Image (cartoon, helix red, strand yellow):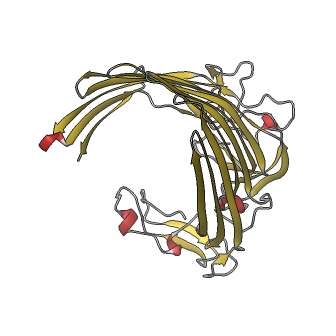
Amino acid sequence: FRSVNEFLSVDAVNASSVYNGGAYQLTETFGGINPWDVFFNVNDDHAQRFGYDYEENINYLGGFGQLEYAKDSFSAFFQGSVSTQSHLRTEYLSVQNEGQSEESEKVNKPGFNVKAGAAYNINSSNVVFANAGYYSRQPFHSDLFVDDRNSNQLNPFVEGNQKITGLEAGYKFLGDKVSANFNLYHTTWDNKIDYSSRDTDNNGQADEFTQTSPLKQVHMGVELEVFTRFADGLNINGFISVGDWKYDGNITTRTSDDTGAVISQGATSYIDGVKIGQAAQFTAGISADYEVLPRLKVGANWNQYDNLYGNTDFNGAEFETENNRGAIQLPSYDTVDAGVSYKWLLGKNDQNSLQFRLNINNIFDEVYIENSRDNIHVEAGDEQWKGVNLDNGVRLGYGRTWNVSMRLNF
């Protein structure tokens, strides 16, 4: 629900709902600048709520089991779980009769997951392993309804559970000075309801919301981690991850405004092969720390991010045709962080300690785009920054920040 936090230059606000008998006034404030109001000034009065007002009742019951086997150089495991969820939504604003709430149809969804894996120690330094799993995951509560804020209407797009299949295989090397992990992964996430939003009047707030028919994502990639200790007190580590994450297949969409009114439905969004955004598909990094003096450590790390794409606007004009340009690619960036720590031993036999630490993040104050809500490509004559159209609503990463901490260990 929504309620009033503070009144500015007025003493009341007009609102209207059938539940509250038509027109009514909001005269009470809740929350605001006093953080304790969350606990001691709770809005439990439907006549002091507006915009949307509903309850979610979600019940969950599940069980889990695991089997493990190990003999000599071979080990294996199997794990599984079963669960059931029930969902019920109660509406208090958009109802038929005054003072009478309305409940949705109760939705019951069973689910399960299974996973199995095995590892083989070739010798004390070399290990190979493989895992496979399948997850029949119940839809999220918001997926079950056409508009979970404003309506009890069930979503016709929901077609059973989400289907997630994961495969992984890898190799581990365990040495005295160097250790490494290498693995391959392939994950398919099918039958998933997804969302996108738009700020059509450019006021900083989304006012159009698009819900998709079940879609399919495919994630695959390789990852390598290396850990070294060539000298006492010196650790140098590194990693690299190369992914290829795409949508598989096209979808249909339903778009509504911020009141829940449907703007359009049934349009096809051609996203087959489009890159999945909001997370870098290539990452790499190096970190090092050194104990300069007993219990005094300094360290730093460098991280690189690339193959980062904007959010897929499922209702955007870009995806109205099969021959589209896909998701916009955001500029690559790298950050450097550093820190220093000291552990002060305390108590009898030095069994306790007080640890101080200073961290400086993004030392060089790198300006970078963390993600983009929109997917607007650059056209001739458009203003841009590092190849990104300035009409895109983006989130910039944090500049240089620092923090100091103190921890007592006892």
Is there any visible trace of residue 253 in the rendered image?
A: yes
Q: Position of residue 128 (x, y in %)?
A: 62, 33
* 205 and 399: which is toward the camera: 399
Q: Residue furthest left?
A: 348
Q: Is residue 128 above or below residue 19?
A: above
Is 242 on the left or on the right of 404, as rendered? right
The answer to whether residue 329 is left or right of residue 287 is right
Residue projecting furthest to the front: 72
**Residue 58 image point, x, y percent:** 60, 68
**Above or below for 71 versus 393:** below
Compared across the picture, whether 131 is left or right of 15 comes to right
Q: Position of residue 92 (x, y in %)?
A: 61, 73
The image quadrant where one finds the N terminus is: bottom right
Picture quadrant of residue 94? bottom right
Q: Nearer the viewer, residue 57 or 209?
A: 57
Q: Position of residue 321 (x, y in %)?
A: 86, 35
Which residue is painted at 60% across and 56% down in the image?
67
Which residue sits furthest right?
Answer: 322
Measuring 60% from the left and 69% from the top, which residue is drawn there?
A: 61
- Report which quarter residue 166 is drawn in: top right
Q: How many marks are shown on the rendered structure? A: 0
Instruction: Tell me which residue sits at (42%, 56%) in the image.
Output: 8
Q: Quadrant of residue 344?
A: top left
> Against 67, is 122 above or below?
above
Inspect this view and state whether residue 347 appears.
no
Going by the image, does 399 lie left or right of 46?
Answer: left
Which of these two is toward me, 185 or 304? 185
